[in-house]
């Protein structure tokens, strides 16, 4: 487990609240701007940042993140760019990436580069535990947190195995589906978090579909972390200009920060 | 030669790289497939459908006039084009559609490039009373407008996919998103030997009938096995179907023909094994067309059905261990073979299949008149008349 990441969850627990985790792809809408958007998220109260590695075939993502990834790829966002963004973040930062970019970089290379840029972990939405041997040994050496996603459909037999492979926190997908804002957080989320807790003391964060302060408050009642991505990206896509985007992102972050405090 | 197939792996290739949400469905599918393989009732039902609906066994045609351009080798065509719906795709589709019913699911989704797999899926759905949604890249809906209409006539809905390169790879992405969301009611009827385990193994098993029939037919006809078996390779289903029963016949060369587009050296191609590198795409580790950051590179081919930047993991493995050979055929070479077969044999092949025929011209000239070549004629060319007319300047 990475100490910086643990410290954030410990502190949140002390304050009797959930941690707020914000997602933004590197290179969207361009490299420099993505750093400033993340800074605005942190300014508004985001505790942990997930820096997305934009990928050409994001099968877990809905329309909003797909659009952001396409823009980031038009900007030729590279692995080095992702690390550069990670390095710029003032709070603990993880990378969220599909598996092929890691494999292409070389597992050892990727982990070394991430550790050097100060990254604390990696969320791997399409890496299964069966394919993880090299990944687990490489991340152990560098204290990089491994975050796997569990789903409402994960069987009782399988869930403990996936949870066991996690070392940062456990990402509980709130519903069966892809990323994107929903009007209501699925009831399956709470049940899944409770099932996960039977097998681990690691923090459990809930993502997929959370976009408002009310939803954050609701999820914070049972989870250790609340993950928000598409809602931030949507604001950036809709903003009139850069200043407007930064303002809106900061406002949403502070609303969500109140939400995770039960306000 | 040792061939491993442990936990859906073929050597270092294969496996499962998917969101956790899909694991339960893949395990259910694997169990259903294994059970069906051992269940005589299932096997009989499928065999009966193939006999009375698909039109199996498909015949072998000797292409004597075409052979004059192929070193006078004996050219034997396995006529999968004569199957109902016009290609090999129906073999896999009927198998998976029957499995869908066994799993108690009522809705199938499918991706399609050329439209052949979509048409076959829509056909099976109509036959078995299933709801069917087909995802198709917007670019391909234009190239293959006739097949879009066919699917609609068969009662399926066709969803044009407007993300990414708007071709087959993006249709697969969209189908996977649908599946993650609706996995309880829906079976993803994947159309080739790619994707996460158990698809590469299961789809191969449903297409093995091509090679099983052909091996016996060639033995009966010629008194010996062929010197080489040739097939075009997109995802690789028709090729693995005809190759697989010959793998232990070490004297039989297995030759896969990939889409070389404008030429592999131009970068505009879909020759994944010849011009790609190992990587992970659509849930499996295989060869992939990718850049230095692991982003999938867009493929190019005159043939929509071969226009895919990935390939089935078993082909990657057969390539790695040297059991099968893979070559690239350019658009122009394929279209030359397309015209030649049409004019010498009265058979208009699919443009996909024309890549295999171009390979036969090469290999026949290399091996000469004593050689016997077995070619998988994977599909007929009706769907390609417009593309071919444009290519040859025939006014429509
Ligand atoms: C006639 C025909 N042959 C070949 C293919 C390529 O697929 P595969 O490589 O899986 O056989 C297609 C795909 O649409 C096809 O329609």
Image (spheres, coloured by chain):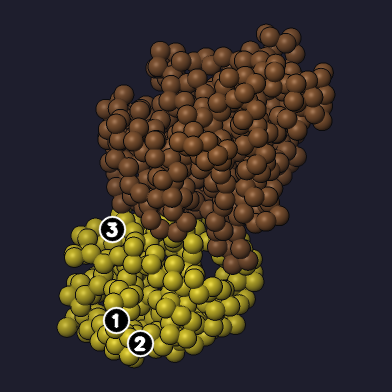
State if disc 1 and disc 3 touch (CB < 8 Å): no
* Residue A118, picture quadrant: bottom right
Q: Is residue A209 left or right of residue B309?
A: left
Colour assigned to chain B in the rendering is brown
Is the residue marked 1 within 8 Å of ligand 1, measured from its CB? no
Q: How many labels does the image show?
A: 3
Colour assigned to chain A in the rendering is yellow
Q: In this view, does B304 lie to the left or right of B44?
A: right
Whether residue B30 is visible, yes or no, is no
The residue pinned by badge 3 equals A175
**x and y percent of residue B361 in the render?**
73, 30
Find residue A242 and name its label: 2
What chain is tagged by disc 3? A
Q: Tell me how far mark 2 sits from mark 1, CA to CA.
A: 7 Å
Task: Give the crowd class for mark 1: few <14, some 14-19, many >=20 residues within 10 Å.
Answer: some
Residue plotted at (35% across, 28% down): B123
The residue pinned by badge 1 equals A239
Q: Tell me how far mark 3 sits from mark 2, CA to CA.
A: 33 Å
């Amino acid at each position: 487990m990475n100490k910086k990441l643990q410290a954030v969850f410990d502190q949140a627990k002390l304050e009797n609240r959930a941690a707020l985790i914000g997602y933004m792809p590197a290179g969207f809408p361009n490299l420099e701007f993505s750093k400033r958007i993340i800074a605005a998220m942190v300014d508004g109260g985001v505790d942990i940042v997930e820096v997305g590695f934009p990928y050409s075939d994001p099968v877990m993502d809905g329309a909003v993140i797909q659009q952001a990834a396409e823009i980031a790829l038009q900007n030729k966002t590279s692995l080095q760019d992702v690390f550069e963004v990670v390095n710029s973040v003032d709070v603990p930062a993880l990378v969220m990436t599909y598996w092929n970019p890691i494999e292409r970089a070389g597992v050892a290379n990727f982990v070394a580069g991430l550790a050097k840029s100060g990254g604390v972990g990696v969320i791997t939405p399409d890496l299964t535990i069966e394919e993880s041997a090299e990944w687990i040994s490489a991340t152990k050496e560098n204290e990089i947190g491994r975050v796997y996603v569990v789903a409402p459909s994960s069987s009782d037999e399988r869930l403990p195995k996936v949870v066991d492979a996690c070392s940062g926190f456990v990402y509980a997908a709130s519903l069966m589906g892809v990323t994107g804002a929903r009007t209501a957080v699925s009831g399956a989320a709470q049940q899944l978090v409770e099932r996960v807790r039977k097998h681990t003391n690691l923090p459990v964060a809930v993502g997929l579909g959370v976009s408002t302060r009310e939803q954050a408050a609701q999820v914070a009642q049972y989870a250790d972390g609340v993950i928000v991505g598409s809602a931030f990206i949507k604001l950036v896509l809709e903003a009139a200009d850069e200043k407007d985007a930064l303002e809106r992102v900061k406002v949403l972050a502070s609303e969500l920060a109140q939400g995770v405090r039960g306000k | 030669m040792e061939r491993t197939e442990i936990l859906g792996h073929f050597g270092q290739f294969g496996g499962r790289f998917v969101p956790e949400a899909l694991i339960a469905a893949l395990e259910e599918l694997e169990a259903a497939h294994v059970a069906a393989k051992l269940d005589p009732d299932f096997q009989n039902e499928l065999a009966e459908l193939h006999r009375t609906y698909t039109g199996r066994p498909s015949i072998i045609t000797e292409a004597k006039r075409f052979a004059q351009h192929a070193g006078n080798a004996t050219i034997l065509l396995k006529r999968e084009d004569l199957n109902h719906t016009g290609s090999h795709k129906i073999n896999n589709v009927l198998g998976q559609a029957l499995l869908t019913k066994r799993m108690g699911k009522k809705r199938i989704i499918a991706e399609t490039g050329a439209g052949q797999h979509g048409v076959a899926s829509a056909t099976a759905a109509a036959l078995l009373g299933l709801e069917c949604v087909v995802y198709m890249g917007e670019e391909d809906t234009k190239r293959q407008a006739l097949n879009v209409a066919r699917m609609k006539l068969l009662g399926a809905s066709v969803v044009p996919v407007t993300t990414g390169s708007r071709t087959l790879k993006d249709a697969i992405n969209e189908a996977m998103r649908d599946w993650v969301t609706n996995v309880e009611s829906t079976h993803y009827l994947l159309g080739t030997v790619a994707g996460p385990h158990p698809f590469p193994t299961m789809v191969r098993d449903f297409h093995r009938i091509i090679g099983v029939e052909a091996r016996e037919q060639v033995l009966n006809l010629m008194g010996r096995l062929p010197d080489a078996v040739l097939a075009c390779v997109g995802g690789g289903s028709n090729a693995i179907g005809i190759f697989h029963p010959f793998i232990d016949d070490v004297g039989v060369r297995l030759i896969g023909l990939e889409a070389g587009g404008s030429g592999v050296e131009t970068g505009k191609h879909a020759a994944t094994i010849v011009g790609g590198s190992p990587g992970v795409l659509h849930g499996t580790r295989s060869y992939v067309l990718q850049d230095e950051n692991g982003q999938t590179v867009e493929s190019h081919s005159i043939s929509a059905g071969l226009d895919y930047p990935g390939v089935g993991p078993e082909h990657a493995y057969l390539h790695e261990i040297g059991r099968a050979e893979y070559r690239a055929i350019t658009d122009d070479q394929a279209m030359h073979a397309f015209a030649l077969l049409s004019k010498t044999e009265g058979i208009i092949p699919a443009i996909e299949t024309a890549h295999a025929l171009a390979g036969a011209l090469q290999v026949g000239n290399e091996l000469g008149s004593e050689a016997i070549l077995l070619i998988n004629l994977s599909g007929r060319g009706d769907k390609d008349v417009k593309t071919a007319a444009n290519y040859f300047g025939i006014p429509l």
